[in-house]
Image (cartoon, helix red, strand yellow):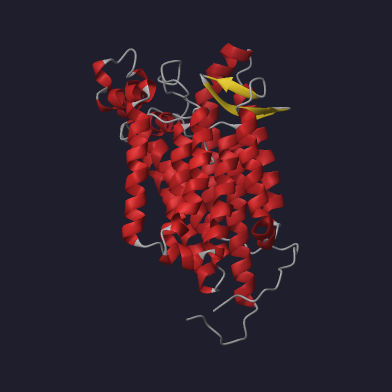
Amino acid sequence: MRRREKKPSLGLKLHIDTILVMVSFSLLLIGFVMVSSASLHLGAKINSDILYYPQRQFIHMMLGLCAATFVAYQPLYFWREHGSKIFLGSVVLLILVLIPGVGVKVNGSTRWLNIPGFRIQVSEIVKFCTVIFMANYVTRQQKRVQDSATGLLQPLIVFFCVSVLLLAEPDFGSAVVTLVIVMGVMFLAGARLLQFIGLLSVIGVFGGFLVIFSPYRLQRVTSFMDPWADPLKTGFQLVQSLISFGRGEWLGVGLGNGLQKLFYLPEAHTDFLFSVIAEELGLVGVITVIALFSAFVWRAFSIGAAAEKTGERFTAFIAYGIGIWFGFQAFVNMGVNMGLLPTKGLTLPLMSYGGGSMMIMCCAVALLFRVHHEVTEYNANLPKGYWHD
C-alpha cells in the first residue's frame, strides 16, 4: 500500500526508540572516555594542556547534538524534496576542497575545510548526502532499478565522478564506503542479482587496479599481509595495534594504563581508537563495542523494515542506508585495527576524535530517529484494528 501524502507536522514531541537511544549514547560516552584516555599525553606535548583534546571532543559532541536536534525535528519530506540539491552542494564542497589554498592538507591528504573553531571532513558530508540521494533515487526509479541495467548504471556513473574527486584528495576509504552505500541500497531496492554481481565485479576490478598502480596503496596491502616483515617502517602501525590487542587480554590493563598510545600507536585517538579500547578494556571492551554497533545496525534495519510496511520506500531506504554506512565503516575500522583489512583512514562512528565527523554522524542518527518517529506516528493514526499485510 502507498502511504498517504500528508506532510507530517513538526510537533514538539518525538517518539523515541529506547534501544537506539541507549546504543547511540553508549557509543558516544565510551568514545569520549577513550578519546580522553588516548589523548591526554598528546595534548600535554602539543598544546601544553592535557585536556585540550577531551575539551574539544566534548564541544564537538555538544555541537553534534544541537545539529542532531534540528535534523530530528525536520520532516522527512524536506529531505525528499531537497535531497538532490543538498547532494549537489556536497559535490561542490568536494571540488572546493581540492582548490589550492582552500582545502586543508594533513598527513599528505587534502580532505578538510576550515570553519572557525574546527575542521570539516567533506567526505563525511558526502556520505550523509549519498544516503538521502540514493533513497530518493530508488524510490523514484523503482521499476528501472529492478528491471534494467541502466537503472543501476545511472547512479554508478554519478558516484564514479564523486569517487574520482575523493580519490584526488586522496581518500580511498571514503570512496569505498560511498560505493558500498550506493550498491547496498540498490541491492535492497530489488536490483537483479546477476546484474548486481556483474557491476560489483567491475567495481572490484577497478579498485584492484587503483591499488596495484598506486605505490602507497600497494605498500599498505603488502605490509598488511606481513607487517612483521618490516615492523619499524611499513608495518609499524599495524604491529603496534596488534601489540595493543595482545596486551589487553581478557579484561585489559585498566583505563588510562595503556602504553601503546604513548607515541607508539599513531592516530590513537582517531583511526586506531579501537586498539586503545582493546588494550585498556580487553576482550570485554572489544566485544561490548562490537555488540553496540551490531545493535545499532539491527535497529536501523528494523526501523527501515517497519517504514517499508507503511509503503513509504524513501523513509525505509534512509534507514537502510544509514545502517549500511555505520555498519560497514565500523567493520572496516575495527578490521583495520585487528589486522584483518589493509590500513584505511576511516573513523569509528560516534567514537573517534573529530569535529566534522562527529557532527555528521550525530545528524545521521537523528535522521534515523526521525524515520522511527514518522513510522510510529503513522501507525498510531491508523484506524483501530487495522494492520499491514
Q: Is residue 121 visible?
A: no
Q: Would residue 336 be found to the left or right of residue 270 on screen?
A: left
Q: Quadrant of residue 259?
A: top left
Give the answer, above or below, for where 72 lies relative to 32.
Answer: below
Q: Residue furthest bottom?
A: 385
- Residue 241 placement (x, y as % from top left): 36, 25
Closer-to-camera residue (239/321): 321
- Residue 326 placement (x, y as % from top left): 48, 47
Closer-to-camera residue (251/365): 365
Give the answer, above or below, for where 363 lies relative to 17.
Answer: above
Residue at 57%, 12% (x, y): give it: 45
Location of the N terminus (image quadrant): bottom right
Q: Quadrant of residue 28?
A: top right
Q: Is residue 74 visible?
A: yes
Residue at 63%, 14% (x, y): give it: 47
Closer-to-camera residue (186/65): 186
Residue at 53%, 17% (x, y): give it: 41
- Residue 276 placement (x, y as % from top left): 43, 29
- Residue 15 placement (x, y as % from top left): 64, 64
Q: How many marks?
A: 0
Give the answer, above or below, for where 138 lies relative to 24.
Answer: below
Residue at 61%, 54% (x, y): give it: 367
